[in-house]
Image (cartoon, coloured by chain):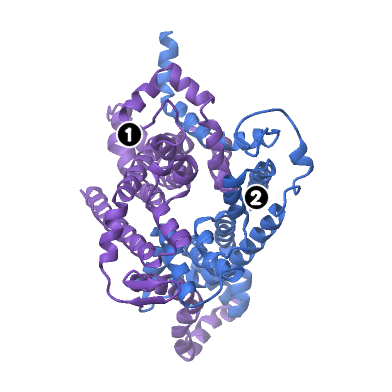
Amino acid sequence: MTTTTEAAPPEVVPLTAPAKRPRRKLTPYWLLLPGIAWLVVFFAVPMIYQGSTSLQTGSLEEGFKVTWHFATYWDALVEYKWHFVRSFSYAATATVLCLAIGYPLAYTIAFKASKRWRNVILILVIAPFFTSFLIRTLAWKTILSDGGPVVGALNTLHLLDISDALGLTSGHRVLATPLAVVCGLTYNFLPFMILPLYTSLERIDPRLHEAAGDLYARPFTTFRKVTFPISLPGVVAGTLLTFIPASGDYINAQLLGSPSEQMVGNGIQKQFLNVLDYPTAAALSFILMALILGMVTVYMKKAGTEDLV
Amino acid sequence: MTRLIGWVRRNLVVLAGIIALAYLVLPNLVVLAFSFNKPAGKFNYEWQQFSTDAWTDPCGVADMCGSLTLSLKIAALATLGATVLGTMVAFALARYRFSGRAATTALIFLPMAMPEVVMAASLGTLFLNMRIPFGFTTILIAHIMFCLSFVVTAVKARVMSMDPRLEQAAQDLYATPVQTFLRITLPLAAPGIAAGALLSFALSFDDFIITQFNSGPTTVTFPMFVWGASQRGIPVQVNVIGTAMFLAAVVLTVVGQTIGNRRKARA
């Protein structure tokens, strides 16, 4: 008796469904409208607008006009070529270091730590996010200070002689050198590397390791042939999440470096906030954006094909 | 000795992991230690002597607590805005097929794949040219903009993994669409929404680059205050706030986890 009444609703639904359909078709657009409008107005339009700003000439008093002045790009590139070189080389170094430092930690959390420890370590990885990163970057000034323990230890091991010779440091100090800036960048973006790595490692079935072991693979071979290839999406995501913000950063160069470590971000910031030369600032950020998008596209294509093969 | 070397070799990964963790936590410990310092000059980079002055008088520095309140206010409003808008977009993307889907996904993805300076400079240029005065509103607009994508990503992942049969079951049991949404869909999506909101709050509260390009001279958020102080002289109270934030985050996460675990245990 009850089963027949319970079976009734499915018969009712198709009757009302056609009437609902036109409204349902519009529902996704209503849901999208406010959020997408926000992104179009305050993200996409400014990006396009910036393109037009970069081709303007004029001054703050007389106003700016679009004059198709492409020379701004050339001048910006000539003036800031070393800033670009430094941005990309520091960011690339920091990304490689993040991978080298972050992978063992992500691996430890995923496979070696007990469940309780896993949560503790994950909290410790995420928690620094909640302390102002400017304060944490300033703490590196204390850690790397001239009379501090790090410089002392590096000096006793004569490592600073080597890094001085390589141009990574100068005058037996770490602060205000490329080493300090790269160290700060690596530190600041390390969590962005660890979290995607952990997510991709955590999904790996530990039985795959056992299977590899049963097939006489040595631990390193297991890592090279099984673990690392499966974790590749995490590696790609982590390297992008580290490289992109690091190449646009200007805080580490400002706080831990000297004027000769300045990156493109410092150039954009100076042109926009101090010099008030908006066309040059726009041209610089346009070039930065184009270079990054180009590199990311090439990298993703390469990583993608390797993944398939 | 050989046994020690063997042990080190077997646990090489874990040891490297511990060193990495130390690298991550070390600056926080330095911030904590130097919150008890009594610096000789204006800068708090060298250890002088132990003192609890800063902890007993955290708001003793002019303008610092005001900037902290401003940052909290902006973070709360930006979180609210980004979470509401982002959740709506996430539901549309996870639940409906519609034309323009690829373009929408690209528009959501791009802000996350763009260096902050680029977004900061372009939005700042727009405000300048539209003659919109920089201040509280422009900061809030910018923060909602860059938090939105992160909320969409977090909520979408959660909604995609939800079992659609639960909602069908509710409708089979004569729940109206509104009832189904409020009693089934929303509670199920809540962890994703909470994760997105938490991330937004953290991102907005800590944002410096976009804020620097889009704030006027009178609206000083906490990161802006620290930046200014790093050039003029840093009061010890900055370390107190940094440490308090770190501890609050750890406590909140632990409490959240415990509640989550209890819920799981009950279910």
Q: Dot 2: what SS?
A: helix
| In the rendered image, the vertical position of residue A83 relative to residue A277, given as above or below | above
Question: Which circle marks residue B113 in the picture?
Answer: none
Task: Decide if residue B49 is on the left or right side of residue A27.
Answer: right
| In the rendered image, the vertical position of residue B8 relative to residue B108, given as above or below | above
Query: Can you tell which quarter of the image residue B112 is in?
Result: bottom left
Q: Residue furthest front?
A: A61
Within-10-Å neighbours for mark 1: few <14, some 14–19, many 20+? some
* Image point (51%, 84%), residue name: A13
Disc 1/disc 2 C-alpha distance (Å): 34 Å
Tag 2: amino acid: Gly
Within-10-Å neighbours for mark 2: few <14, some 14–19, many 20+? few
Q: Dot 1: what SS?
A: helix
Q: Residue furthest left?
A: A309
Q: Which residue is mark 2?
A: B256
Q: Position of residue A127 (x, y in %)?
A: 58, 44
Tag 1: amino acid: Phe
Q: Position of residue B201 (x, y in %)?
A: 59, 58
Q: Which chain is blue?
A: B
| In the rendered image, the vertical position of residue A218 relative to residue A230, given as above or below | above
Q: Chain of mark 1?
A: A
Q: Which chain is purple?
A: A
Q: Residue furthest bottom?
A: A19
Q: Which residue is mark 1?
A: A223
* Image point (53%, 36%), residue name: A141
Q: Position of residue A270 (x, y in %)?
A: 44, 56
| In the rendered image, the vertical position of residue A285 relative to residue A155, given as above or below | below
